[in-house]
Image (cartoon, grey):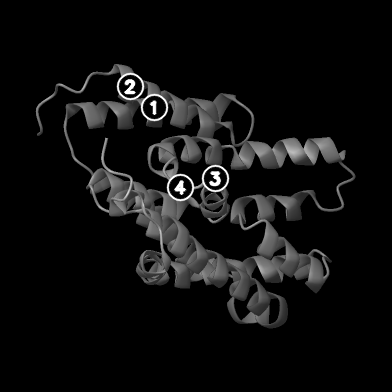
Amino acid sequence: MPHVGSTLYRLNQQIAWQGFVTMLPIAFFVSAFGAAFGLAAAQAGISDTHTLTMSVLVFTGTAQFAVLDLWGSQLPALTILVTLFAINARHLLMGATLFPWLRHLPTKQRYLVMLFASDANWAMSMQAFNRKQPGLGILFGGGIALWLFWVVGTWVGVYFGNVISNPEAYGIDMVMGCFLLALVLDTEKNAHTYLVWAVAAAASLLAYWYLPENSHVIVGAIAGGLAGTFGGQQDAEL
């Protein structure tokens, strides 16, 4: 096992700042989604204070937009909580994949880092770890950048939302998907990798068609993980 003092397992102010700077380009686009959320929340009748507090404390765009759909629907609180848990359950898988590196941190610091975990900085930190490069700075510092721009974007949307009321018209809604796809395609490519991709994609698609909403995220992740674990890794690189 590498020494705990290795930069792979270390987190300090300099490393966090480097991660913050690394994530700034994608954070800029996150602010546009924050603005769209702020505007949508205002149109749904949610107070400015509640909207901004939600972005500060929750920091998960998909779940926050889902709350807007459920707001005022007279659904039981338990139903809303279960829906939000299903949407965010992928964070359980994120935490599991990050544990080999997070376990070297003090417990309080470990949970603080995970407060800022999202799809983008998780994907980039895992890419760094797989290349034997430090990724905790991207996870924590980059997460702070994403969170900060999300909150600022929400504020802009609440007060100046009409400026960018339809981000899809500018293709901004495709930025995150293209970003994550680019990271996936940049990984090592061999028969084993293609097997994992195919299994995860097929399982996600079937779950999307036949299972409850948002369950395809968990099903695809579990199926891909099982394929990666038991599919064998002896294939030669293509």
Verify CB contact (< 8 Å) between mark 1 and mark 2.
yes
Q: Depth-wise, is mark 4 or mark 1 nearer the camera?
A: 4
Q: Residue at x 47, y 40 (%)?
A: 94
For badge 3, the amino acid type reads: Thr
Residue 109 left/right relative to 128? right
Q: CA distance from mark 2 to mark 3?
A: 28 Å
* Image location (x, y in percent) of residue 84: 69, 42
Q: Does label 1 or label 3 sit earlier along the sequence?
A: 3
Verify CB contact (< 8 Å) between mark 3 and mark 4.
yes
- Which image quadrant: the C terminus? top left
Q: Residue at x 41, y 63 (%)?
A: 12
* Image location (x, y in percent) of residue 165: 62, 73
- Label annotation for residue 105: 4
Are there few (<14), some (14-19), or many (20+) residues within 10 Å of tag 2? few
Residue 169, compared with residue 231, is above or below; it is below
Q: State the SS at label 3.
A: helix
> Which residue is label 3 attached to?
107
Q: CA distance from mark 1 to mark 2?
A: 6 Å
Residue 83 left/right relative to 110? right
Residue 11 left/right relative to 195? right
Q: State the SS at label 2.
A: helix
Q: State the SS at label 4.
A: loop
Q: Does label 2 or label 3 sit earlier along the sequence?
A: 3
> Which residue is label 1 attached to?
225
The image quadrant that residue 68 belongs to is bottom right
Q: Does label 4 or label 1 sit earlier along the sequence?
A: 4
For badge 2, the amino acid type reads: Thr
> Which residue is label 2 attached to?
229
